[in-house]
């Protein structure tokens, strides 16, 4: 299994067909309601914490699974901040997020209903959004990380 840290709250786990066989999984039967999947995922997260320090205790996790061409799969794990770390957005409050790739920035922008602007800054992309009253933070956290503007 290859482990990639994609951002402060995002991790990518790349499993080849050998990894999948070791966990007794196939892409088609990955279902978190299955005990086999739960056990495998807990093991993967323990390995990720040991390897790169990515802690998942106390966080809500969003997991996206995609098949890989070699018979394995790619799991993207996004850690949602603990409730006490989140601040409510006020109407008219602009928020700024940093993205590692143009694709992530554009995907985030397309998911928003609020006005937003994207700029290239250094090696990343910055998106500033006026949430217009309805917090868009949850959507943006799927793709990037919030920064101070």
Image: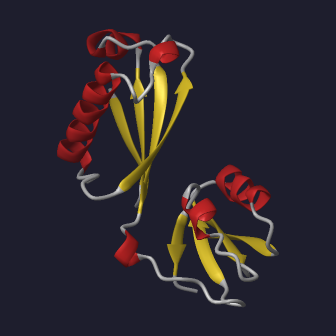
Q: Residue at x 57, y 57 (%)?
A: 100
Judge whether 114 appears above or below 58 on screen: below
Toward the viewer: 48 or 133?
Answer: 133
Toward the viewer: 41 or 73?
Answer: 41
Where is residue 39 shown, x and y percent of the image? 25, 27
Name the colouring of the figure.
Answer: secondary structure
Q: Residue at x 71, y 78 (%)?
A: 131
Quadrant (top left, top right, bottom left, bottom right) of the N terminus: top left
From the viewer's perspective, tell me whether residue 96 is left or right of residue 82: right
Whether residue 129 is visible, yes or no, is yes
From the viewer's perspective, tell me whether residue 109 is left or right of residue 122: right
Where is residue 128 shown, x and y percent of the image? 69, 77
Quadrant (top left, top right, bottom left, bottom right) of the C terminus: bottom right
Q: Residue at x 59, y 70 (%)?
A: 137
From the viewer's perspective, tell me whether residue 113 is left or right of residue 53: right
Where is residue 18 shown, x and y percent of the image? 34, 10
From the viewer's perspective, tell me whether residue 77 is left or right of residue 50: right
Quarter holding residue 112? bottom right
């Amino acid at each position: 299994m290859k482990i990639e840290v994609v951002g402060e709250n995002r991790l990518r786990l790349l499993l080849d067909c050998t990894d999948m066989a070791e966990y007794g999984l196939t892409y088609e039967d990955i279902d978190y309601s299955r005990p086999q999947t739960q056990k495998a995922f807990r093991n993967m997260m323990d390995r990720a914490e040991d390897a790169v320090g990515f802690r998942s205790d106390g966080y809500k996790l969003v997991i996206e699974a995609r098949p890989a061409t070699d018979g394995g799969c790619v799991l993207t794990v996004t850690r949602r901040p603990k409730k006490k770390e989140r601040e409510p957005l006020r109407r008219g409050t602009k928020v700024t997020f940093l993205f590692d790739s143009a694709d992530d920035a554009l995907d985030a922008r397309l998911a928003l209903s609020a006005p937003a602007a994207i700029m290239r800054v250094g090696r990343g992309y910055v998106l500033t959004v006026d949430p217009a009253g309805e917090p868009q933070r949850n959507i943006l956290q799927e793709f990037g990380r919030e920064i101070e503007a």
